[in-house]
Amino acid sequence: MSVEQATAQKSAPEPLTTEQITKETAKKYGTCTVIAAWLAVFCLFGYRSSFSIMQSSLMEGMSWTSTQASLGYCFMMTFYAITAYFSGDLIDKKGTRPAYTIGAICCFLGFFLTSFIPEGASWSFPVYLVTYGIFAGVGTGMLWVSSTISCRKWYVGTEYGTKWGLAFMGAPMAQLLLTIVVSPILKSAGWSAGMKVLSVIMAVMLLIAATVAKPMPDKVGAQPFGLDSLPKKKADAAKPAHVWTVGEAFKTRALWCDIFAFMFAVMGEFLIWSQIVRYFTVDLGWTQPSLLGMPLANVIYMVIGLAGIFTMPLTGKASDALVKRMGVERPARRMMLVISPLFGIAGVLLALSGNLPVVIVGMVLLAVYWGIEPGGAAGYAGTVFGGASLGKIWGLATLIIMGIGPSFGTFMGAFLFDTFQSYVPALYFGIGAYVVSTISALLLPGKVESK
């Protein structure tokens, strides 16, 4: 070896270690991760909530049935699920910044290109399936795994629920604010103008998220916050954490029960989210103008978002308090997953009453369900499989969950309406999905051994 080579080798930077990032910098990175996740969740659920608001206008303008309009949403969720699988591996390797950047481009195109589809053209429907289904699906697919897993990698134990609750507040904020923004546009200019406005909102917010995003803790030599709240056996203190492979993870009852609990929960959830405004309009006849000139049905739908602003952080704190009380994270996350769909069942039953004050209470209960289930499922998986390969494992799990649950739930909601000309059978189908989710959560193991 030459003198120059030896000198260059000595001066080359050493790999990052746990000592190369200060606690202050780690805290800043964790905070930025939560902020970026908030923006990503806002855009993801902005796509979901805006569909329910625009569906009637879209059906009227295009002369489509409820099933046809909902098929675009189903296509979006299918491509969302496929993309989520690949995004998990991308996050493990490169972090969330490239995922948010791709999301910004595709989410913009999903709304923007769809907005130019002419009403009445014979080729409008297949083009709608491509623009709204594929572009929006790929864009939103980059957002869910990246936001949940980045928060889980930075926060564990008694820290995770609270921080994820803050990040997940982006979801109800989207449902509330975008309903206020889109409703008057739909009334005055139609669905096409609404989609153009939404396309700009998506692009701007996700580009900000990509700018704010920081690397994962294992890439900068940091430890996740809340690690000291996790109990460790003295005999295992010196052992390195087990790194799960995807194949090994998918041989466990823990992962499959977690998948089924979340999949059936979102099956009922997406059925309700995508069709509830139409239920209020068609079955209950709540079409009269209300707050800010919006139809009463839209205002009642906004209650979920308004309540969610408070339930997201509160349920997060409640889950962390349960972890602290029980002293072990996994059984606490399991218990929350059992409780969550019960709130969903109660919320739908109250919605079926048709009594306005009772329905409003039901929307609040649905917001409580919403605050627990998504983060709880990812949180439980994190307690079992750790952080190193959690992106890949949860990415593949999300492919299964979101490839089946939301699409099938949305389709069944529209199909049952077209069959019975009422959304009541669809809501009962949603209750059944929540029941299966509860049973699956009860089967989640409290202890998992790696082979």
Image (cartoon, rainbow, N blue to C red):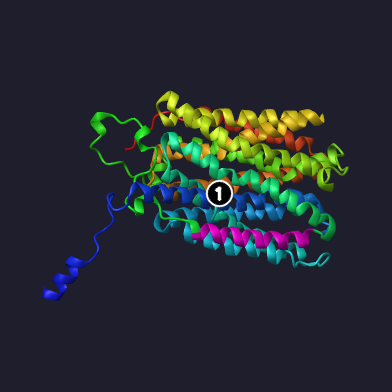
- Give the quarter of the image for residue 166: top right
Which residue in the protein does label 1 denote?
A: 38
Magenta residue span: 191-211
Q: From the viewer's perspective, is 399 left or right of 407?
A: left
Frontmost residue, 150 versus 128: 150
Frontmost residue, 109 versus 179: 179
Q: Quadrant of the N terminus?
A: bottom left
Q: Main secondary structure of the magenta part?
A: helix
Q: Tell me where residue 411 appears, x and y as whole percent.
A: 70, 47
Q: Tell me where residue 313 appears, x and y as whole percent.
A: 56, 37
Q: Is residue 130 visible?
A: no
Residue at position x 82%, y 47% in the image: 292
Residue at position x 60%, y 47% in the image: 170
**How many neighbours does mark 1 have within 10 angstroms: few (below 14), some (14-19), or many (20 or more)?**
many
Q: Quadrant of the C terminus?
A: top left
Residue at position x 22%, y 66% in the image: 12
Q: Is residue 307 visible?
A: yes
Q: Tell me where residue 77 appears, x and y as whole percent.
A: 62, 52
